Amino acid sequence: MIKLSVCIPVYNFDVRDLVYGLKKEIESQNLSAEIILIDDFSDSLFFSLNSEIQNIASDYILLDENNGRSKIRNLFLNYAQGEYLLFLDCDGKLIDKNFLKNYLDFLSENPVSDVLYGGRKVPAETPDQKHLLRWKFAVERENLSVEKRKSHPYLSFQTNNFVIRKNVLDKIPFNISYSNYGYEDLLFAMDLKSENILIHHIENPVLNNDVETNERYLEKVKESVSSVASMLKKTAVRNRISDIKLVKAFEKLNFFPLHYLIVFLFIISEKFLEKSLLKGCKNLRYLDLFKLGLLFKLMKS
């Protein structure tokens, strides 16, 4: 019987409902699964809220400093007993009572599978204008059908809800050189691709239960573009991310003297673009232009 280790990195989020839901499915269906949580130095409020589930999890590890998104995922290798690790973001919400069983059934029927992505959803109802940007990006760019994800299995991979064989993660861990938000999941996918590790896609999504404000999301966008700029400055990594649309646009336009013109145009339009995005701009082209201009600015600074 396959054993599944459910691995949840926790940071400043109330994860109780998610853990209770997982525990209920494990017990009601007698599944071979364990729940492991590693708290990445959350604020005391969330530590207090989540303390009631310490005895429910197989392991609940509290870190005394913040390790970041990549390093904390690698830490689960030290605690997981399962042959496969299921990684879930702490803001996920279960929407299928057979969520774990769906993964275990697929793995039983496809024993050679090494990596499996289940997908994601956001609430169907359009949020208020202050939360519109992140929601719209998720709906138009992230919440893809299985068919679309299968057509680009590596570019469509995300780390919010995926299963990986333990010995594969041990061989190909997350790159801890990039601990900030943004594109670390794609870099990991490209590392898998370079080792000919296939990523399978099925319909087994979780709900993103924390649609961010426009302000918060835009700050994360800036952080993600900064991560891309850092990656582009390293030749080995640069080749791994060449398929990203943002990188493709940058490479296509990055020649003298056009790059100076793009930086100039971005500088004079940056405030306008940012203001439009903070208002919950309905056209994601504004976001694309903002990312591209910011990347040129960072690369030329």
Image (tube, rainbow, N blue to C red):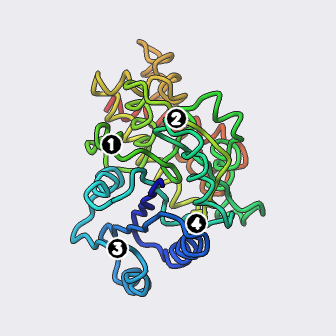
Q: Quadrant of residue 230?
A: top left
The residue under label 2 is: 199
In the depicted structure, whether residue 136 falls above or below residue 251: below
For marks 3 and 4, give the CA distance.
16 Å
290 or 140, nearer to the observer:
140
Q: Which type of secondary structure does the marked residue at label 3 adopt? A: loop
Q: Earlier in the sequence, mark 3 or mark 4?
A: 3
Q: Amino acid at mark 3?
A: Ser
- The number of discs equals 4
Graded by Cα atoms within 10 Å as few (under 14), some (14 to 19) or many (20 or more), the crowding at tag 4 reads some
The residue type indicated by label 1 comes to Asn
Q: Position of residue 259 (x, y in %)?
A: 44, 20
Which residue is the extreme one toward the left? 64
Taking the view exactly as shown, the residue that stands out farthest to the front is 1
Quarter location, residue 165: top left
Residue that numbered label 4 is attached to:
210
Rounded to the nearest angstrom, the CA distance separating label 2 from label 1 is 15 Å
Of the two numbered discs 1 and 4 in the rendering, the one whose residue sits closer to the viewer? 1
Task: State the mark number for residue 42.
Answer: 3
Q: Is residue 262 depicted above or below 203 in this figure?
A: above
Q: Nearer the viewer, mark 2 or mark 3?
A: 2
Question: Element under label 1?
Answer: helix
Residue position for label 1: 167
Dot 2 or dot 4: first in sequence order is 2
Element on which disc 2 rests: strand
- Look at label 4 and name its amino acid: Asp
Of marks 1 and 3, the one in the foreground? 1
Toward the viewer: 114 or 152?
114
Q: Mark 2, mark 1: which one is toward the viewer?
A: 1
- Locate residue 49 relative to residue 129 in the image: left or right: left
Say which element carries label 4.
loop
The tag earlier along the polypeptide, 1 or 3, is: 3
